Amino acid sequence: MPTCLRPRSCASLGLALLALLALVHCDGNDEPGNHETKRDPHVVRGGDELQENPGSLSPPIVVEPLYTCATAVTVKGFIPGARIDIFADGAPVGGGVSDAPWGQRFAVTALTDGQNVTATQTFGGVTSGPSPSARVRPHSADYPDGVPPPRIDPKPLYRCGKAAAAHNIVPGSFLEFLAENPRSGGGFDPPAVVGQVNGSGAGQWTFINPELVRDARVTARYRICSDSSPPSAPEIVQEGPNPVPAPAIDPEIYENGRHVIVRNVINGAVIDVFDGPTRIGGHASPGGSQIVRLDSPAIAGHILKATQTLCVTSGPSPDTPVRPCSELPAPIIQAPEAGDDRIRVIQSVLGSRILVFAGAEEVGDGGGPLVLLTRRLRVGEVVTVVQRLGSCQSPWVYRIPVACKVTEEVPDPSLGGRHAAGRVDYQLPPVTLGVDSVRLWATVRYPAAADGVNTALSPSPPSRFPLVVFLHGNHGIFRVDGEDVCPGDGGPPPGASEVLNHEGYDYVLDSLARGGFIAISINANDLNCKSGRIPERAALIHAHLDLWERLNDPGQPDPAFGGKFHGRVDLLRVGLAGHSRGGEAVVQAALGPADPDRAIRSVLSLAPVDTRALRLRDLPLLMILPAADGDVVDNPGARIYDRAAPAGAESWFKSQMYVHGAIHNDFNRQWLANDLDVRGLPRPAGLMGRPGHEAMLRAWSRVFFDLTLQGVEGHRPLLAGDAVVAGLENARVFPSYQRAGSRIVDHYEDAPDDAARNSLTGSVSRAGGFATFDEFSFRQTAGDQFNGTFFHDTDGLVEQWQGEASFASALPPAHADNSRFGFLSLRLAQVNDRVNDPARIMNVRLGLEDGGGTTAEVESAAVGVLPFPYPHPLGGKTMMRTLRIPLACFDDPGAGLVQPGNLRSVRFRSTPTAQGALALDDIELTN
Amino acid sequence: MSIRSNIARFLTLVLALAGAMSACARGPAAPEEGAVPRRETYAVEAYQVRLRQPVEMLAEGRKITVSEVVELRVTAQRPIPAQALDPVLMVGERPVTEYRYEAPNVLVFTEPVPAKLPARAPVSFQWGQGPGAAGRQPTGFTFERSKLERRVR
């Protein structure tokens, strides 16, 4: 029999006749409200014991970007009902009172270039500290090719509509909707302004007055400073539904609540919300789901209804009772990590106040979805989050300890984009490359106005799109009875069709086009079924780039596409991506020849061969390695990764994704056979399916080229292993990452080998039971290996211990100040060695010591998994991954935070009761 | 370190030569049900070929002109797949890397410097050279220079 933990809830049901129902209501969980919270172990009863501190008001948040000439600023994260004051360079420029902490737009004096804008909130007579400063900049910095046209959305617009919305607007602009009413004899009246907003958001709705008439032509436009946007695509007003369906009120409405969400609203309809017979709120809406502010706080037990009117009025919505204070749920927050200065609220009741405590200390008081804190969180302390609506406080709180590191899961950027994807193909006369005659053959996806073949290029900026070039690898070029084969002296076998090897990445090209890239995939069939041909493949890439220079040049004839791409290709932002032999060829192509009219900016290499020991310098590299590769079984791309290095470019980085259970062929939709089968190797258990391969290549391609060609810096954590793309099989992925500007404590490349001295010339002292503590080559071909299971192209340390063992690698005084860094980074791997247990995740302790004698440790398992090498049928490869530990994690409960500005040593300590063998390289302080 | 090096060499050999069923000491996971490894068999013929016209070929990375070569014709039961790694024919420890497809299931390997081949050695087939080479497979054919059939082409 379940136990009811909420006597108040049970008692509230009252009657004995309802006792059974009450037990069911409380079955297994007494958390009321949102069902999603029911299984969350962090939701606990409490809150009364917490001592509120009125002085801990959170600074609000000024939403960026802020552009010169903008006449409104959006502020969020404040207590509902607080007064917001906005300042530019310290002088007040606007503000007001709001109960919409998810984002309230306030009118301000027009902003000027270079101003620093801040905001404060005042509540209960107390004023918060200022928000982080947001700097005003000219919109031309983000829109160098002019401002884009807005897009009316949702659509269609309906007769009698009294609201409309538009998107794709430069924030802070002056937005207008214009209607041209139809003339009885045909044509349209002159345009008349029917709606306007001063200080628009990026997406903005407004009231329309007078209401829309049938067949009117409506457009939107905006202006900021002296720039006016092109008009939006016109929308013709249509007849709306009749009868009008009833809307619905979201059931999450609680006592004291000031807002309801009304769903199923028709575009342009007027919503009315009623408490019994009394209208308590409503206005016109652009449809979908609409937040409606109530004229007075909701009263527990009252029944709310809503109607919507579009020419005619709908019937009422189903009854929505206002739930009592006792059912107000706990808020839910994203798991906090050490050093956080804000809490992200991922579930809360609309318009609620959120109070945040660290231990017993109140450190934040604001409103969701983001609450700034008055100090940074420390690892291990317990955060408690409380939700209030007016005077009602939830009897439940969200309580969670602060972790060293939380790997954030972010939505897959490759699943969307602001463009449609167009397609063209070309197959031009062959060029001679070495002894081969090679067709210039490729498939192209580009940002378009509409999906389809040869549709118009996207009208949205930028005017020039970066170019990404894909190249496949060696594979059969004719398909016979489902098998891909190489032709012999007699030519293609009877009945054979040519394998479209280059079309195997269409799913990636499509995503890239939607994200604003022109993406091409080259066919290299004429170089397949032959030995090597890496230089020829690289030359083929350059031959296509030569072609794209011509396709981009308005002065050149373009019989293939009629000038479609003239002036629309940014050849100074070129990215290369190659698979298998193509994966080495893209590295070769990136190394030259140089051409002043184009610039290869980054290289993605997937399961490459490594026949030429190429060394990339200064170019960002993403290496994807399938651990179960049945073709290039030794993952030689790891060597290309190891050799890649900076040569002065501050923006340089390299990232490697070693994917357990991934194989060679499943990234290309034309390569249908399992490469392990082809090679006659047994399949390891638990291989990843083809959809998993494709999702990874699509997501990482988009992330990588977004960052390296479009400057989307927010994607960097996804390549550093600090965040993951939602929906991928991330538990299989073991990332490596390195970036320019790091301080390398030890790279183990110094000659002669000396495990007692690091690369900063600091001493390395060790204690305890090390059976081995020495520098080795991690290569297959070198003599001084620890064992034959290493496939890298680097040197490193192997330490093998029995029981407790530790070492400290000293930072000389000249290198003690590391305050500019945020992470300690190391490359580590369990060695494929009998002392390690294949079933065990290795867990060691990594530490820092500062000059004041403070030492703190972090368990490796807190920041990443160190598994036993993947069981490839030809043997487990000792393949290192990077662990990145935020410096905020080095926080000893007694001694305090290790001071990065005065570091003395990096430390290692084994798990006391275990034995183990660990490979280690590239100990560094980094960002 | 020398003991380590010897162990390393041994393990390298183990990894390089391990076939489908001779995995590392810890053993691979069991194959998925229904995944039956396919073992190819190769038939080999060898010829001494005199070329009517001298041709340029690559030999150990250098372009040379040759008028007489050794060809090793390898026939498989099924089409020989094109993969990232090139097929390599090992005559003893001498890799023969230049090849062309005569038919989907027939490769003709060419040794441009016949004198580099051993006088008598077993012939095996593998994919790739160096660290990635794996699954060297004996063909059952023994190369004997003195018994080569002569051809003119």
Image (cartoon, coloured by chain):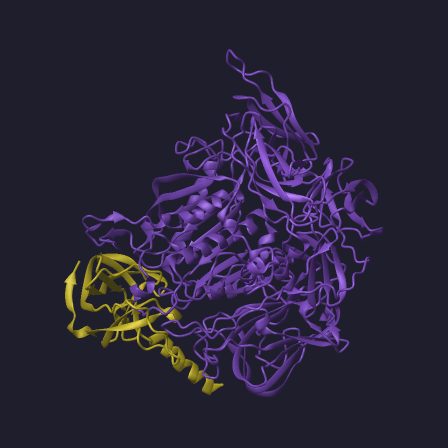
Where is residue A842 drawn, in percent x and y?
Answer: 53, 77
Eyeballing the image, is B1 above or below A745? below
Q: Nearer the viewer, residue A170 or A167?
A: A167
Tell me which corner region of the image, top left, top right, bottom left or bottom right, holds residue B94: bottom left
> Which residue appears farthest toward the top when viewing the image?
A185
In the image, taking residue A731 as reference, residue A270 lies left or right, namely right
Where is residue A467 drawn, in percent x and y?
Answer: 49, 44
Q: Nearer the viewer, residue A138 or A336?
A: A336
Q: Which chain is purple?
A: A
The residue lying at 52 percent from left, 12 percent from top is A184
Q: Colour of chain B?
A: yellow
Image quadrant in which the C terminus of chain A is located: bottom right
In the image, taking residue A840 as reference, residue A269 lies left or right, namely right
The residue lying at 45 percent from left, 73 percent from top is A869
The answer to whether residue A688 is visible is yes
Eyeballing the image, is A136 above or below A829? above
